Amino acid sequence: MAALVDDLSQARMTLETARSGLLAETYRDMAAVEALWRGIESDPGVLGTPYQRFDWVSAFLAGAFAGDDGRQREALRIIVLRDAAGPVRLILPVICRRERGTMVARVVGGSHANFHMPLFASREAAALRGEDVVEALRKAGADAGIDAFVLGYQPRFWDGAANPLAARSEPAASDAYGLSLGPDAEATIRRIFSADARKKLRVKEKKLVEAVGPVAFRVASTPDEVSAFLEAFYRQKATRFAALGIVDPYGSQSVRRFLAQGIDAQGIASVSAGRAIEICALVGERDGRVYATFAGAVDAVRYSGMMTSFDQDPALARFSPGEILLRHLVGYQAGQGRRGFDLGVGEARYKASICDETIELREVSIPVSARGWAVTAHAVAWGRIKRRIKRNPRLMRLLRPLRRKVSGVLSDPS
């Protein structure tokens, strides 16, 4: 690892430390920081989300750049902040793109990552002053040719620790929703699902079985299962988006490469080991038909829901296969020893029905250069507009027909 730190051919190190004593290194090559990154994320004291795992970020880049290493190196910046004594405090991977002539850095993953928090080496590292982290990022940005950082989806708190980047920020348009898992899977299900909800789901599952035959909850553990579950997901989502008149974001080949890589990042040796993303399904035992799917980013202690789908056939949808699958999924994740479970950003009835925690999200905009000030001002203004719309049910109802005609009306203009 010492050799990695000393290899300045792989990094441009800022020559001047921030007043806080933080020193920034900026890398463009994932391989150059792999050992360092994996060492930090495997430490029991690490504080981070599944979306900043090395394997998750690698999978996203593999999808976005399709093996074009030159283009990836042009866009990728991996910022490592150390204290003056040398220990790493945080890692922040960003993608840089020119927007209206200005170089803007955003966290790797975009809207596919529910949380954009840096990977903190420890809780002590997360206790850094927000001003010191921002100052160090500004210095790193100036050295790397970045005009502005636009860092959305920053949890205000994570696993009980404050996120220093959220100290001076704007509320996000939407929050995320989660719950704590217990060591006993059945006890966790009883706590999360009321007696009435459990009874209704048992009745629906029984009626589904009567209609189609035995069904089973399965987490993909073979390449064939991964392929079958993903194909079902793509088919079900395409049907859903077509009905809404919205462009299907999962039709993109880059997104499909990313998901395939993330689910099978290390080759499937076991159900969960070595994966960045897990996908599960409610499957017919007789014919293998997939009635619902759910996929999420994972680390040792958390499952973070990324996407879900269900069969749009009205004769089957009335049995709520997605809700049946969700009940099984919660029990399975508790049984795997994970402590946290979340259903990602945005409001939905199925989230409210089981989640008892609101994960407050913030948006952080950091200007680096004079040109960057205009970008961050625009990001703040646009964020306030989105927040006003999304948190006003009347405005949402009025804009829903327009959103169906113009996909992405509530998304970032970039």
Image (cartoon, helix red, strand yellow):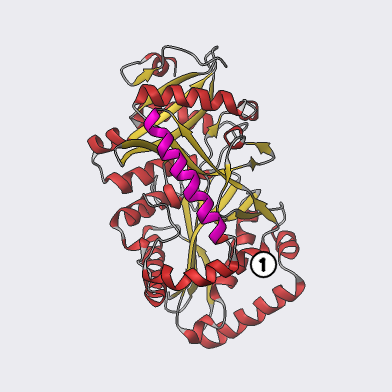
User: Closest to the observer: 300 or 128?
Assistant: 128
Q: Any magenta on residue 388?
A: yes
Total numbered labels: 1
Q: Amino acid at mark 1?
A: Ser
Name the image quarter holding the N terminus.
top left
Q: Which residue is mark 1?
A: 353
Q: Any magenta on residue 188?
A: no
Instruction: Report the magenta residues as a range.
Output: 370-389
Position of 32 with respect to 331 (left or right) is left
* Residue 109 position in % (x across, y down): 42, 46
From this view, report whether residue 208 is shown above or below residue 268.
below
* Residue 65 position in % (x across, y down): 28, 44
Position of 305 with respect to 58 (left or right) is right
What type of secondary structure mainly makes up the magenta span? helix
User: Closest to the observer: 126 or 286?
Assistant: 126
Q: Residue at horizontal 38%, vertical 54%?
A: 259
From this view, report whether residue 9 is shown above or below residue 113.
above
From this view, report whether residue 181 is shown above or below residue 301.
below
